[in-house]
Image (tube, rainbow, N blue to C red):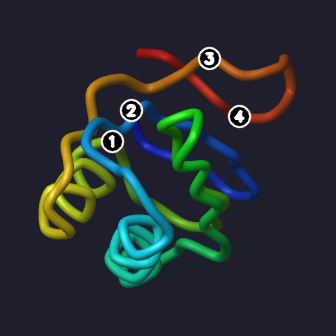
Amino acid sequence: MTEGPGTVNSYRVEGMACGHCANFVTAEVERIPGVTAVSVDVDAGTVTVTGEGSFGLAEVRAAVEEAGYELTAALPGPPGTGTSAS
């Protein structure tokens, strides 16, 4: 899965427990070229990535793992957001 221009994608992340966890994940995911925004919901165990350019699930997974957590799934989103579970 490659993210296209103006896409918003959400992912399930395991192991986050606090605001520091969210900060670590945010910092790593923001390093991916093309990412324009990152939103982490620790309570829901999700990270939402907004981007322009060409990045994919593998890059997001690697960034989350670099932060010390596990990306377990891409989550489907509302039609028209560019989000894909594939």
Q: Earlier in the sequence, mark 1 or mark 2?
A: 2
Which part of the image, by quadrant, shows the N terminus? Answer: top left
Q: Which residue is mark 2?
A: 1
- The structure residue drawn at horizontal position 86% and vertical position 27%, both measured from the top left corner, is 80
Nearer to us in this view, 28 or 3: 28
Identify the residue position indicated by label 3 in the image. 76
Between discs 3 and 2, the one toward the N terminus: 2
Q: Are marks 1 and 2 in contact (CB under 8 Å)?
A: yes
CA distance separating discs 3 and 2: 13 Å
Judge from the rendering whether residue 36 lies leftward or rightward of residue 80; answer left or right.
left
On the rendered structure, is 84 left or right of 62?
right
The residue mark sitting in front, 3 or 4, is 3
Q: Which element carries disc 3, helix, strand or loop? A: loop
Q: Residue at x 35, y 23 (%)?
A: 73
- Distance of mark 4 from mark 1, alpha carbons? 13 Å
Mark closer to the chain start, 3 or 4 = 3
The type of residue carrying mark 4 is: Gly
Kindly state the secondary structure of the residue where label 1 is placed. Answer: helix
Residue 69 in the image, given as x and y percentages of width and height: 20, 51
Q: Residues within 10 Å of mark 3 (few under 14, many from 20)?
A: some
Check disc 2 and report its element: helix, strand or loop: loop
Q: Mark 3–mark 4 contact, CB under 8 Å?
A: no
The span from disc 3 to disc 1 (Cα, nearest Å) is 13 Å
**Mark identifier at residue 57:** 1
Residue that badge 4 annotates: 82
Residue 76 falls in which quadrant of the image?
A: top right
Query: Could you tell me if the residues under marks 2 and 4 are in contact, i.e. CB atoms within 8 Å?
Result: no
